[in-house]
Image: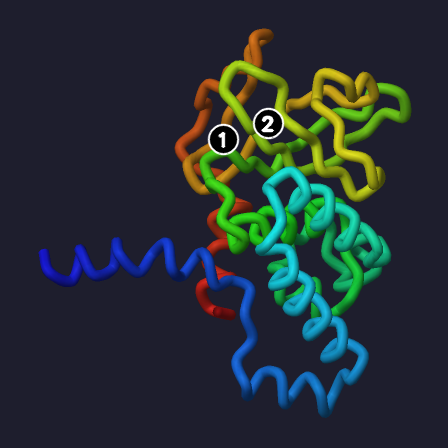
């Protein structure tokens, strides 16, 4: 019982410190990938500077900052389609697909103190172009449309105003959800296999 309580107390601390790089990791990255090393330091400093801002400003700053990293499709980066990179992998490589942007924004906002239960990696349908896309949604308040952080847009709008997108699935550590017309979520699965694999990679690379 004692160890369970210790684990539960450390769990929020673990979430708030990721992504972080050890001294050994940074030394190795600096030797092998100097540009990646500078990128990681810049990201770390930027997140620290955001702590003094309000949550609304933090949302805008994180979305803008991370959108400046260049997009690249998964099959070009690692020859694997629909691969979910951890934030540390994304920062080291310097390129990412839409899901990688959503994931690093998710972890960055948690590190800044956002409630994880209000953040969802979201699979959306692109109404005008067809196909699927992935964004990060933030439910600031209940029964209101979430705000959308999209790697294809520097402007954060509510999902209600994003007529080009139709939300299909909302995913975080608590499960997979769909959304009703009144913007309330209902659970359709206990977990996402992709998200669970991501969590394992995060734990192993912490």
Quarter residue 7 falls in: bottom left
State if disc 2 and disc 1 touch (CB < 8 Å): yes
Q: Quadrant of residue 147?
A: top right
Vertical arrangement, residue 4 with respect to residue 155, above or below: below
9 horizontally vs 163: left or right? left
Disc 2: which residue? 169
The quadrant in which residue 125 appears is: top right
Mark 1 → mark 2, Cα distance in angstroms = 7 Å
Q: Which of the two residues, 13 or 32, is positioned nearer the viewer here?
A: 13
Residue at the image position 75 percent from the left and 72 percent from the top: 39
Which residue in the rendered view is the most extreme toward the top?
A: 181
- Give left or right: position of 112 versus 105: left
Q: Say which of 58 and 146 sits in front.
A: 58
**Element under disc 1:** strand
Q: Could you tell whether 19 is left or right of 64 in the image?
A: left
Q: Residue 36 in the image: x percent, y percent? A: 75, 76
Position of residue 25 relative to residue 164, above or below, is below
Q: Are there few (<14), some (14-19), or many (20+) residues within 10 Å of tag 1?
A: many
Provide the secondary structure element on which disc 2 rests: strand
Q: Position of residue 54 (x, y in %)?
A: 60, 43
**Above or below 14: residue 129:** above
Q: Look at 48% across and 69% down and name the residue there.
A: 206
Q: Quick one: 163 or 56, which is closer to the camera?
A: 56
Expressed as whole percent of the image width and height from the top left, the position of residue 160 reads 71, 16
Residue bearing the label numbered 1:
176
């Amino acid at each position: 019982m004692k160890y369970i309580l210790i684990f539960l107390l450390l769990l929020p601390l673990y979430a708030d410190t990721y992504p972080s790089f050890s001294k050994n990791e940074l030394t190795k990255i600096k030797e092998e990938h100097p540009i990646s090393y500078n990128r990681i330091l810049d990201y770390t400093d930027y997140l620290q500077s955001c702590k003094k801002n309000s949550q609304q400003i933090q949302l805008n700053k994180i979305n803008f900052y991370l959108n400046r990293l260049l997009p690249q499709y998964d099959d070009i980066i690692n020859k694997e389609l629909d691969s979910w990179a951890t934030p540390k992998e994304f920062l080291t490589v310097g390129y990412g697909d839409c899901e990688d942007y959503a994931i690093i924004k998710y972890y960055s906002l948690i590190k800044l103190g956002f409630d994880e239960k209000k953040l969802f990696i979201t699979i959306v349908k692109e109404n005008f172009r067809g196909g699927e896309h992935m964004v990060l949604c933030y439910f600031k308040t209940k029964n209101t449309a979430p705000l959308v952080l999209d790697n294809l847009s520097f402007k954060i709008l509510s999902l209600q105003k994003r007529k080009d997108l139709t939300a299909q699935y909302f995913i975080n550590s608590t499960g997979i959800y769909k959304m009703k017309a009144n913007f309330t979520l209902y659970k359709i699965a206990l977990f996402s296999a992709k998200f669970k694999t991501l969590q394992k990679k995060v734990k192993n690379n912490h």
